[in-house]
């Protein structure tokens, strides 16, 4: 069997397992197929995701189900205004032995896991939010001058209330940039909400079981990086990301007039990985321009900032991303 055929076989087998995961999670997180897909894209890409939506939409339930189905050790932290960095990372305590000697012992915080749910992350102060920065980027934390490695794989799935709500703090830009995707969780439609009512208010209990384990997740992440990406898709990613930088010569007037700053190279890397994962979830062997366009809002929205003048006119970043993306795709199609 050639390397190409072997890769195709591996991708097909992984796709079958992911279909099983989606079917199982959809039993407890009903009517939000796109949200589930984007979270799986995040895990396959080896990244972190932030879920934005109002309370009560099932975000916490989704992450709990994901921890079981993916076979990873998960922890949950409820972020509150009085939460301190040590409450997340852990701390050293002084202990006295029977012989009277004293020594420090490190007590691990909840960040020492494989899947961390940071619930309502923007309820905590910026100081506490930043405690996750090193963990998200390096998979380790430094406590009392000692570097300590976290679980492998390590993923953060954070939930965030809309920043217009009282008692919330905007996340710092450096931390936002470390989230692979920003996933918008909307209200379910009427049919889905009816299914939720019937599934959650009866006596039937849904039993979840592991489909993956940690080693299989790591293998899947390696496989994703082997998927081929055509030159046209690579060029489209570059064109798209660079078009949202106001100072770039290729930026359209719409961006120059309305954006304060745009996405950095990490956005290109995130989009490159995410389109591969989405192609796999859709049963394709390589990503296409459609994958790039559909994932652009989730990759770019939290990595750029719109000017106050544009906001005062009622324009949103998602609308701007959609308009610029469509313009670039049309130019590519007509070239």
Image (cartoon, rainbow, N blue to C red):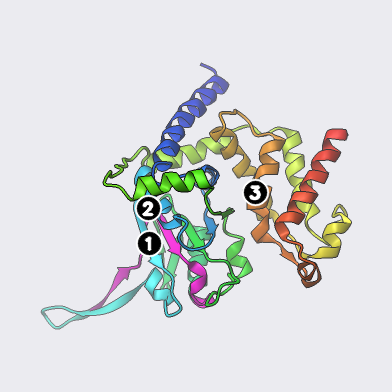
Quadrant showing the C terminus: top right
118 is higher (above) or lower (below) than 45:
below
**Please, what secondary structure does the residue beneath circle 1 have?**
strand
Foreground: disc 2 or disc 1 = 2
Looking at marks 3 and 1 on the same chain, the residue that comes earlier in the sequence is marked by: 1
Q: Is residue 124 visible?
A: yes
Q: Which residue is mark 1?
A: 76
Side of 62 relative to 241 (left or right): left
Where does the image place residue 325, in percent across and percent down from the top left? Answer: 77, 47
- Specify the farthest residue to the left: 98
Instruction: Give the spatial CA distance, label 2 vs label 1.
Output: 9 Å
Please say if 166 is above or below 330. below
What SS does tag 2 mark? helix
Going from N to C along the chain, the mark reached first, 3 or 2, is 2
Residue drawn where x is 42% and y is 80% of the image: 82
The residue labelled by disc 3 is: 269
The reply to whether discs 2 and 1 touch (Cβ–Cβ < 8 Å) is yes
Q: Viewer-proximal residue, 212 or 331?
A: 331
Residue 238 placement, left or right of 281: right
Instruction: Name the residue at 40% across, 38% down.
Output: 216
Residue beneath disc 2: 64
Pinpoint residue 76: horizontal percent, then vertical percent: 38, 62
Distance in Å between CA atoms under marks 3 and 1:
28 Å
Which quadrant would residue 234 be assigned to in this image? Answer: top right
Question: Crowding at label 3, few (<14), some or many (≥20) Cα neighbours within 10 Å?
Answer: some
Q: Which residues are magenta?
A: 103-127
Q: Secondary structure at mark 3?
A: helix
Does residue 111 show up magenta in the picture?
yes
């Amino acid at each position: 069997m050639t390397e190409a055929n072997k890769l195709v076989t591996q991708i097909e087998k992984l796709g079958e397992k992911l279909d099983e995961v989606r079917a199982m999670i959809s039993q407890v997180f009903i009517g939000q197929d796109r949200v589930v897909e984007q979270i799986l894209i995040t895990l396959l890409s080896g990244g972190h995701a932030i879920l934005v939506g109002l309370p009560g939409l099932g975000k916490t339930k989704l992450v709990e189900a994901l921890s079981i189905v993916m076979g990873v050790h998960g922890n949950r932290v409820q972020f509150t205004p009085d939460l301190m960095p040590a409450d997340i990372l852990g701390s050293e305590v002084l202990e006295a032995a029977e012989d009277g000697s004293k020594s420090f012992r490190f007590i691990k915080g909840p960040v020492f896991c494989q899947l961390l749910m940071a619930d309502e992350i923007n309820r905590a102060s910026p100081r506490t939010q930043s405690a996750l920065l090193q963990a998200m980027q390096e998979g380790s934390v430094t406590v009392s001058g000692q570097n300590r490695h976290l679980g492998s794989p390590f993923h953060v799935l954070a939930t965030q209330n809309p920043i217009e709500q009282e008692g919330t703090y905007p996340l710092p830009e450096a931390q936002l940039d470390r989230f692979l995707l920003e996933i918008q969780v909307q209200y379910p439609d009427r049919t889905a909400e009816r299914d939720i009512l019937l599934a959650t208010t009866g006596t039937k209990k849904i039993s979840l079981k592991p489909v993956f384990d940690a080693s299989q997740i790591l293998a899947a992440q390696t496989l994703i990086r082997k998927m081929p990406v055509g030159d046209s898709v690579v060029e489209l990613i570059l064109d798209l990301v660079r078009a949202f930088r106001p100072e770039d010569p290729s930026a359209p007037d719409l961006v120059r007039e309305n954006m304060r700053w745009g996405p950095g190279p990490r956005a290109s890397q995130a989009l490159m990985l995410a389109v591969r994962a989405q192609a796999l979830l859709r049963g394709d062997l390589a990503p296409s321009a459609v994958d790039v366009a559909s994932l652009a809002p989730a990759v770019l929205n939290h990595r750029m900032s719109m000017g106050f003048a544009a906001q005062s006119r009622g324009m949103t970043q998602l609308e701007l991303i959609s308009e610029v993306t469509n313009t670039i795709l049309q130019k590519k199609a007509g070239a």
